[in-house]
Amino acid sequence: MRYISIISVVFSTFPILSTPANSSGFEIIAPHRAIYEIELVKASERSGIKSMNGRMVYEVRGNECEGITLQYRFLTRVTTGRSQFLSDQRTSTFESADGKNFDFLTKSFLNEQLEETVKGRAKQLNGGVSVVLDSPATQEFEFAKASFLTSYLVKMISKAKNGEHFLREDLFDGSDGGDETISTSSFISNPKTISDSKSELDEEIVNSLKPFQAWSVSMSYFKKDIGATAEHLPVFESAFLLFENGVSTDLVMRYPEYTLSGKLSKLEMFKNTSCKQDG
């Protein structure tokens, strides 16, 4: 399953740091852990899905000098007409502070049994992206220009804060086998507030989000190089209310045969790890 989480700007209580020359803007990212309760909104008869629920945990650590580590776990229990199974995807990525290097590892489990491991590293090189895949098999790929995950998220936040409404960008995030980039197209609304949230959030979360403006974001993901005669429909769509502190609520994930919702149930902010300045 593909999921893009949005992270960014630092809480006003965090210290303001000077930006290193090689920084990609990661100083706006707030270390945190967000937990979402996953529910099935609808499923087509063709999918065979009778029910689905679970939990998604998303964790951000690091800073603009060392780079950013993202930890993500998506656990869902699915019931079909004939069986029930547990799907568990665990992903870890690291993007260097200059936005040029990206390491990724995903382990996929089915009923607590390891099904697949995808591990590799990517590098921005000569206007494109070079990828070395270690697992499930040793392979090398080269792609046209694409952003890595954290750089992509910083770019989206910057556009939102500047009042821009569209972002079209190729993305490499190491998902779906780590052997392709994907085209994205996003629409960003005018600024909103917590009162525009459609979710019934805990009072503690509501109070923490009141000081910040937000934007409704709709993202579509498209396969590349599918041929001129193919119907160019998105393979995945997501929508969420994005706050300028990097928290997102009202999550919706639309797959071809089913749609999921994600309610933010817990938010924990980590202590900011400041860069060590020489002198």
Image (cartoon, rainbow, N blue to C red):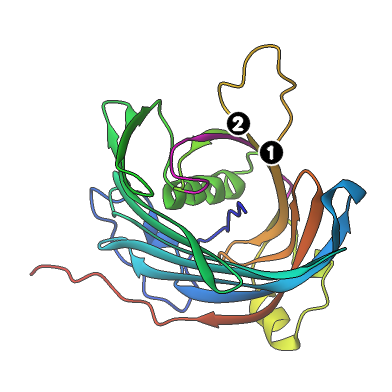
Q: Is residue 184 magenta?
A: yes
- Three-letter amino acid code of the residue under disc 1: Val
- Decide which of 47, 61 is in the foreground and name it: 47
- From the viewer's perspective, tell me whether residue 18 is left or right of residue 75: left
Q: Is residue 45 above or below residue 167?
A: below
At a point 92% along the width and 50% down the height, the residue shown is 45
- Three-letter amino acid code of the residue under disc 2: Lys
Mark 1 falls on what kind of element? loop
State which quadrant residue 219 falls in: top right
- From the viewer's perspective, tell me whether residue 132 is left or right of residue 109: left
Q: Is residue 201 above or below residue 1?
A: below
Query: Label 1 belongs to which residue?
Result: 235
**Disc 1 and disc 2 in contact, CB within 8 angstroms:** yes
Q: Separation of disc 1 and disc 2 at Cα?
A: 7 Å
Query: Label 2 belongs to which residue?
Result: 223
Most extreme residue toward the left is 279
Residue bounds of the magenta highlight: 175-190
Number of numbered markers: 2
Quarter holding the C terminus? bottom left
Q: Is residue 151 visible?
A: yes
At a point 29% along the width and 54% down the height, the residue shown is 96
Q: Position of residue 70 (x, y in %)?
A: 43, 64
State which quadrant residue 236 falls in: top right
- Decide which of 71, 164 is in the foreground and name it: 71
Which numbered disc flags the more N-terminal residue, 1 or 2? 2
Most extreme residue toward the right is 45
Q: Position of residue 266 (x, y in %)?
A: 64, 82
Mark 2 falls on what kind of element? loop
Q: Residues within 10 Å of mark 2 (few under 14, many from 20)?
A: some
Most extreme residue toward the front is 82
- Decide which of 14, 203 is in the foreground and name it: 203
- From the viewer's perspective, tell me whether residue 10 is left or right of residue 205: left
